[in-house]
């Protein structure tokens, strides 16, 4: 089988390493991939949003199955375009990817179908948004409607801050078109849990839960990033909570999408907050999370390609999705200054004995050397019987990897450890 993977981050590296475990897989192409992925797949210099380029490549190279993981190509209709040429895909069609592509859509969906989420109002008129803020409860949360690289969410602690956020999104267009419509929502409190789930539009099979660490600095301080590390499973996700989520959130979401004529197939990501009043949806993503995937897939015991094909062929109910009863920790090594300004081009040294634990994100290959080429450079994942051991092992690996200006959080998993002890 010839497989194409669209994307070029740590998440795609984790997907590719797992797909390679299946003996049916003859060849994997990554579009565009990166310098680290090049060691596990053939990288082709076609961008993840170049839908025409991706389709032409797939047709010309006799691709049997395409795995589309980043949000942009999914929202742009990459799966629709490939399917039109008869190429089977893992991932939702454009009509379903809107669940991430438009926060106004996903909030309306949840309201219409009674799926628990923060109270909210949607605005496309700035004056109305500003006047609403005169009396809205504070803190409040302002979200740009469209995709904004995870940066389109502002938690305003004061009325002034909230108004400034609205002005920067709607008048100054800080997020371009993504901020023309905004959602203002209730501030929720409680631990956050990420749950990725495979679905074929009928059956939902959740993966092991995980916890992201979104802020740049230790102690959850600093700016929001794409994610500085993850652990799995998430100790806040008890069996009782999992049962409630299935009944109150996962199945209702799949059914709601079907009722809207937008059947979702692929990986649906539920960003949840476990509030005093039960689990609520913070956000949906139409894809695997990054860096959640880097802890979730290494724990997958079942064959990834088989499960992916089951979502496409709609026989997920008969397909086993099993996870190891172990713990994983992924520590992201980034470039100093990320997520704002950072230098690139430094040589990365990874000892060969831990190479299989490393998922490369922002790196390029030059003269057989791996050089830093992005904010998040790589992630290191270790699996152990206990969370504590997994954390220690990941940090041992981090010590062995070096590049100039390397920067990483020292406390990945510490909050989960405390929670697990309670
Ligand atoms: P999102 O991109 O929607 O996941 O938001 C990014 C982060 O902002 C989330 O991971 C939460 O930590 C935080 N956040 C989003 N919505 C809310 C909310 N309604 N209440 C509190 N925190 C929120
Ligand atoms: N780690 C969060 C995301 O992938 O959006």
Image (cartoon, rainbow, N blue to C red):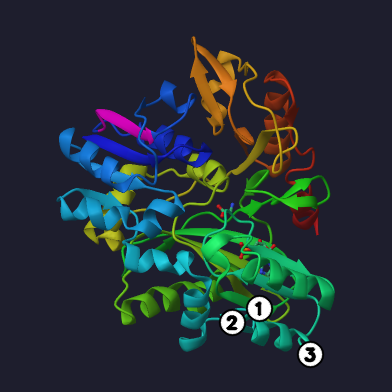
Please tell me which residue lies in front, 63 or 55: 55
| Residue 373 against residue 172 in the figure, above or below | above
Figure quadrant of the C terminus: bottom right
Callout 1 environment at 10 Å: few (<14), some (14 to 19), or many (20+)?
many
Tag 2–tag 1 contact (CB < 8 Å): yes
Q: Main secondary structure of the magenta part?
A: strand
The residue shown at (27%, 50%) is: 89
Task: Name the front one of labels 2 and 1.
Answer: 2
Residue 81: tell me if it is visible. yes
The residue shown at (56%, 32%) is: 362
Numbered disc 2: secondary structure: strand
User: Alpha-carbon distance for marks 2 and 1?
Assistant: 8 Å
Callout 3 environment at 10 Å: few (<14), some (14 to 19), or many (20+)?
few
Q: Position of residue 236 (x, y in %)?
A: 68, 62
**Tag 1 or tag 3, which sits nearer the N-term?**
3
Numbered disc 3: secondary structure: loop
**Tag 1 or tag 2, which sits nearer the N-term?**
2
| Residue 399 against residue 206 in the figure, above or below | above
Numbered disc 1: secondary structure: strand
**What's the mark number on residue 184?**
1
Q: Position of residue 421 (x, y in %)?
A: 79, 54
Q: Position of residue 128 (x, y in %)?
A: 65, 87
The magenta segment is: 25-31
Residue annotated with mark 2: 123
Please tell me which residue lies in front, 316 or 133: 133
Total count of labels: 3
Residue annotated with mark 3: 135
In the rendered view, does 175 fall on the left or right side of 17?
right
User: Which quadrant of the figure has residue 349?
Assistant: top right
User: Alpha-carbon distance for marks 3 and 1?
Assistant: 12 Å
């Amino acid at each position: 089988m010839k497989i194409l993977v669209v994307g070029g981050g740590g998440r795609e590296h984790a997907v590719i390493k797992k797909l390679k475990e299946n003996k049916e897989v003859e060849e994997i192409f990554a579009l565009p991939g990166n310098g680290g992925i090049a060691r596990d797949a053939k990288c082709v210099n076609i961008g993840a949003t170049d839908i025409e380029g991706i389709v032409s490549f797939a047709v010309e190279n006799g691709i049997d199955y395409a795995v589309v993981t980043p949000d942009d190509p999914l929202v742009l209709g990459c799966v629709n375009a490939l399917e039109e040429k008869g190429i089977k895909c893992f991932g939702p069609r454009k009509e379903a990817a809107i669940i991430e592509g438009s926060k106004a859509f996903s909030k309306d969906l949840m309201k219409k179908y009674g799926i628990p989420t923060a109270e909210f109002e949607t605005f496309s008129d700035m004056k109305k948004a500003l006047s609403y803020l005169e009396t809205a409860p504070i803190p409040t949360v302002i979200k740009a409607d469209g995709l904004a690289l995870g940066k389109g969410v502002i938690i305003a602690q004061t009325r002034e801050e909230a108004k400034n956020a609205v002005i920067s999104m709607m008048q100054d267009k800080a997020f371009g078109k993504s901020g023309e419509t905004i959602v203002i929502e209730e501030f929720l409190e409680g631990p956050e849990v990420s749950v990725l789930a495979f679905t074929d539009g009928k059956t939902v099979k959740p993966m092991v839960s995980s916890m992201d660490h979104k802020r740049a600095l230790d102690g959850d301080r600093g700016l929001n990033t794409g994610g500085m590390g993850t652990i799995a499973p998430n100790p806040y996700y008890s069996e009782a909570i999992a049962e409630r989520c299935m009944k109150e959130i996962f199945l209702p979401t799949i059914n709601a999408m079907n009722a809207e004529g937008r059947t979702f197939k692929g990986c649906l990501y539920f960003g949840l907050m476990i509030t005093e009043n039960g689990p609520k949806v913070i956000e949906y993503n139409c894809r695997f999370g990054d860096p959640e995937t880097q802890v979730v897939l290494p724990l997958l015991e079942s064959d990834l390609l088989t499960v992916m094909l089951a979502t496409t062929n709609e026989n997920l109910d008969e397909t086993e999705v099993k996870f190891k009863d172990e713990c994983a920790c992924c520590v992201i090594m980034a470039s100093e200054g990320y997520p704002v300004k950072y230098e690139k081009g430094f040589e990365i040294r990874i000892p060969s004995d831990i190479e299989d634990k490393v998922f490369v994100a922002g790196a390029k290959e030059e003269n057989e050397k791996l050089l830093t080429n992005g904010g998040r450079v790589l992630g290191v994942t270790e699996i152990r019987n206990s969370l504590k051991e997994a954390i220690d092992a990941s940090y041992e690996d981090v010590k062995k990897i070096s590049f100039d200006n390397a920067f990483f959080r020292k406390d990945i998993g510490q909050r989960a450890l405390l929670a697990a002890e309670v």
